[in-house]
Image (spheres, grey):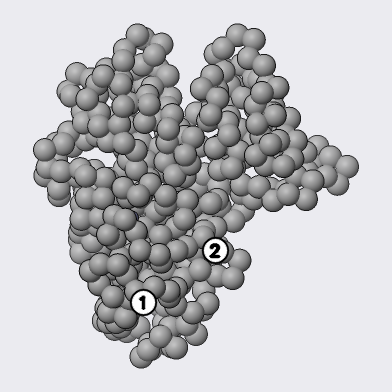
Amino acid sequence: MGPLRSATAQSGISFEELRRQQLQKLRAGLTDVLATNAFWRARLHDVQGWDDFERLPLTTKSELLQDQVSRAPFGSNLTYPIERYVRLHQTSGSSGDQPLRWLDTAESWEWWVRIWADHVYRAAGVTAADRIFFAFSFGPFIGFWSAFGGAHRLGALCISGGAMTSEQRVRNMLDVGASVLLSTPTYALRLAGVADEIGLNLSAAGIRTTIHAGEPGASIPATRDAIESAYSAASFDHTGMTELGPTGHSCSARDGVHLIESEFIFEVASDGELIATNLGRWGMPLIRYRTGDRVVVSREPCSCGSPFLKLVGGIRGRVDDMFTVRGVNLYPSQVEDIVRRHPAVADFVIERRRERQMDEVTVLIETSLDGFATDRLEADLRQALGVRLECRVVPVGTLPHSELKARRIVRVDG
Ligand SMILES: [Zn+2]
C-alpha cells in the first residue's frame, strides 16, 4: 500500500513532519496496548518504523464482531481494566450485522470531542456564539453524543432534538433561533418537507450552517444544493465511524472531505478501500482497520489551507453497496446525484432483484406530486450513468424513514 505521498502540503506541517508525528503517537500508544490488550497482543508486533507498521495485518469488522461473540459482552480489545471506561456505545446494526459495542475511557472521549471542536466545527465556521440543534434521537449510537459533546466543548449552545416528531423539531429550531443544524442529509430534506407542509419557512429561519453525517449526501452536489436552498445555509459533510472515531470533514473548497491525519493514519488499498488507524483511543484502539468505504484520495494543495489528505468527492460508497447493471458498476451516491436534481422527489430507494441470473434494478420514488412522470428522471439517469434504470412511483410513506443512515439499497429475492 505504501504512504499516501505526493506534493508537500501547501501550508502548516510538511508531509515528512506529519509522518514523524504519526509514528511517534503510534509507538507511544502501542506501549500499553502490547502490554495488556489481549486482542492486539495476539496480532501485533512492536513497531519501530513504517516498514514494521506496513507488515501488520489488516483488521475487519467481522473479526471484531466475532471477538465480541466469543468474549461477550465487550470482547478482548481492552487495554485497561473495565473500571477505567466511562462510556459504552454501539453501532446502529443498519447493515444487518449485530451491533458492535465500543467502550471509551475519559481520555478517549476527550479525544473525540476535541476533534469535533477543533476540526469538524472549526472547518464549518461554527463558534461559541452558535446555537446548535441536534435532530437526533440520542439513542446508543455514538455520533449523536460525540457531536453534542464537541459542541459543548466549543462553548456553543447545545440543543437536543431527541424524542420529538419532525414537526416539533422544525418548530423548536425556529422558536429557539437555531443557527446550526446537525442531521443526516436525508433527514434535513425531510424536515424541510415537513416545514413546507405546515407553512413554515426554514430558509428565513436564521440557520446558516448545516453539518451532515451518516450518508455521503453533503458531498453529493445535487443533495447539497437541495439542502442549501431549503435552509439558505452552507452545508458540510462529516465522516466518522463508531469503532474508529471522527475521521474527516468537508471544507470551503467544497470538493471533498479532508481526513484528519493528525489523529489517524490513513491508507488506501489497491481496490480503493480506506484503511484507518486511530491515534488517540488507546483504551479500545483500531489498527489498520478496513473501513468498507471506497475512496479516491488526493494530496494536492487545498484552497482552504488544510495540509491533510482529501477524499475527492467524499466517500464514493460502501464497498458492499456497489451494484452492477448490464456490466456497469454503480454506487447509490451516483443515482442520488441525479435523483436529487428532481425537487418533486421526496425520497428514493434502489431495489435490486435477481432475475434470470441478471441483476435487475428499479429506483422506487416517493413524491407528493400528483401525476409525476418518471420519463425525465429515467432519461437523466440513462444519460449520466450510461445504463437504463427503471423508475417507479410508490405512495408517500412506503419507504423506510430513518434519522440514522438511510438504506439506499433493498434486495428482493425472487
Ligand atoms: Zn480544504
Q: Which mark is residue 235?
A: none
Identify whether 13 is placed above or below 385. below
The image quarter containing residue 308 is bottom left
* SS state under label 1: loop
On the image, numbered disc 2 is attached to which residue?
273
Q: Amino acid at mark 2?
A: Glu
14 vs 367, left or right, is left
In this view, the mark in front (2 or 1) = 2
Q: Residue 62 or 187: which is nearer the viewer?
A: 187
On the image, numbered disc 1 is attached to which residue?
37
* SS state under label 2: strand
The image quarter containing residue 379 is top right
Q: Residue at x 67, y 42 (%)?
A: 385
Q: Residue at x 26, y 50 (%)?
A: 123
Q: Position of residue 16 (x, y in %)?
A: 32, 80
Between the residue at mark 2 and the residue at mark 1, the CA separation in whole angstroms equals 27 Å
**Badge 1 local density, few (<14 within 10 Å), some, or many (20+)?**
many
Q: Amino acid at mark 1?
A: Asn
Identify whether 144 is placed above or below 169. below
Q: Position of residue 179 (x, y in %)?
A: 21, 31
Q: Position of residue 211 (x, y in %)?
A: 32, 40
Identify whether 171 is placed above or below 93. above
The image quarter containing residue 360 is top right
Viewer can see residue 289: no
